[in-house]
Image (cartoon, rainbow, N blue to C red):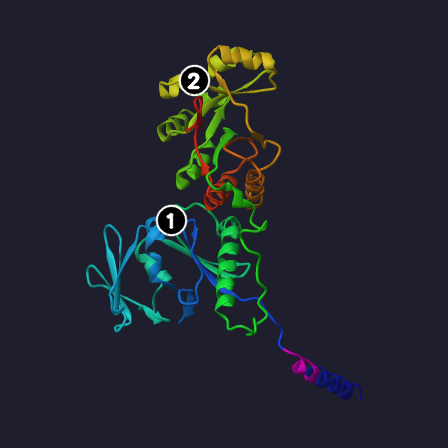
Amino acid sequence: MKRRAAALLFCLLLVFQLSLPPARAAERVYFTAVGSYVLPLSDNTMPFWSGGYVYIPSSIFTGAAREALGVSQVLDSGQEWVTLYSVRKSLTYNLSDHCALDNDGTVYYPGAIRRNGTVFVPASTVSRYFDLVYSVIEVEHGSMVWLRQPDYNMSDKLYAGAAQYSMNSVYADYIRAKETARPEGGSSGGTARPSSPSEPQDPAAGLDGMRIALCLKAGSDAAAMADALAVYGAGAAFFFTPEEMERQGGTLRRLTAAGQGIGILADASHPEQTVEEQLEAGNAALFRATCGKTRLAYIQNSGAHTLRTAGEAGFHCLRPDLDRSGSALRSASGAQELVRRLASWRGDAAVWLGDDVSPAGLRAFLFAAREAGGECAAYTELGLR
């Protein structure tokens, strides 16, 4: 009897659920990202899966994305074939043959697909042939196919976090375009429209044209920090204690060659050395490593008299516009917070980061700052360069 009652109750619930209107869901999309660029969204160029392969539009191998990957495309005017090529090799897809041929005539499967008037190629084959790396990452509004050079040293999770602003903006533009194209009075399909990227949702909107001088205490990971800067073509200033300068001669030479700022980190409360002695020791170590000296210094725990004395000795003492040494820069959230703080600043800014910085956090900030139109420049005794 109980079983019959339970079965009857289940049937009634099923009928009730079937009578409800379908639940409305946000529109799920596939983003395309190349290097540090999140590309515009379009139904005609959106990646898709077919036969176990994810396909990407061949049109991404143009413009800034082409420069980031080192691969270009030549598309036949009739869209019967497309050739992707780098400096040393090429891969041609003939849409009627369902395969590709390289310079030597070697055949590669699967072939290209034409959809919505756009030619798509398999991400796995293209990445493997041109020595690229790709990932399919789950993100807020769907998934993202991310292509990059193999030396792009950032995890999928960190990249997705750093690219969140760009994805929100691209997604908002996509939804806005679809709603504009929808006939007046038509159903919106329940898609929630995100805020416009010009609204306060995007804290990076105020970075356009800002020059940012990142100043940090150089520790054992200074070389990894230099790697992050090199990926983005960015500048910064590294402040070494005399002891660190003695230990990191190779890093000092690399930073000098790259045009990065190098300064001496001194402490006015040092129990054994005066500020003058620390500055002299730092320059002596720097000269042994690079045959050069610096006049850039950051003096901790100093008063006006100490700074004036160092200035009279010819040193340019850093006086940061923003002191962020109490705030960590070790993740995408830390990077977003720093961008948010800079968005409220007017004009160029020298930012003291201290030593609570990781290479991953620095990469996330460089990505976010560049996406917002900011420029991270080297800082020397002559100021921003």
Q: Residue furthest front?
A: 184
Q: Nearer the viewer, residue 130 or 113?
A: 113
Q: Position of residue 242 (x, y in %)?
A: 49, 19
Q: Give the extent of the magenta segment.
A: 15-21
Give the prevailing secondary structure in the magenta stretch.
helix
- Marks 1 and 2 sit apart, C-alpha to C-alpha, by 36 Å
Q: Nearer the viewer, residue 275 or 270?
A: 275
Q: Quadrant of residue 97?
A: bottom left
Image: 312 above or below 104: above
**Image check: 79 left or right of 297?**
left
Q: Position of residue 144 (x, y in %)?
A: 47, 59
Q: Amino acid at mark 1?
A: Pro
Q: Is residue 17 magenta?
A: yes
Q: Position of residue 105 (x, y in %)?
A: 20, 63
Q: Is residue 52 magenta?
A: no
Q: Position of residue 371 (x, y in %)?
A: 46, 46
Q: Is residue 93 visible?
A: no
Q: Residue furthest left?
A: 104
Q: Is residue 254 visible?
A: yes
- On the image, numbered disc 1 is attached to which residue? 150
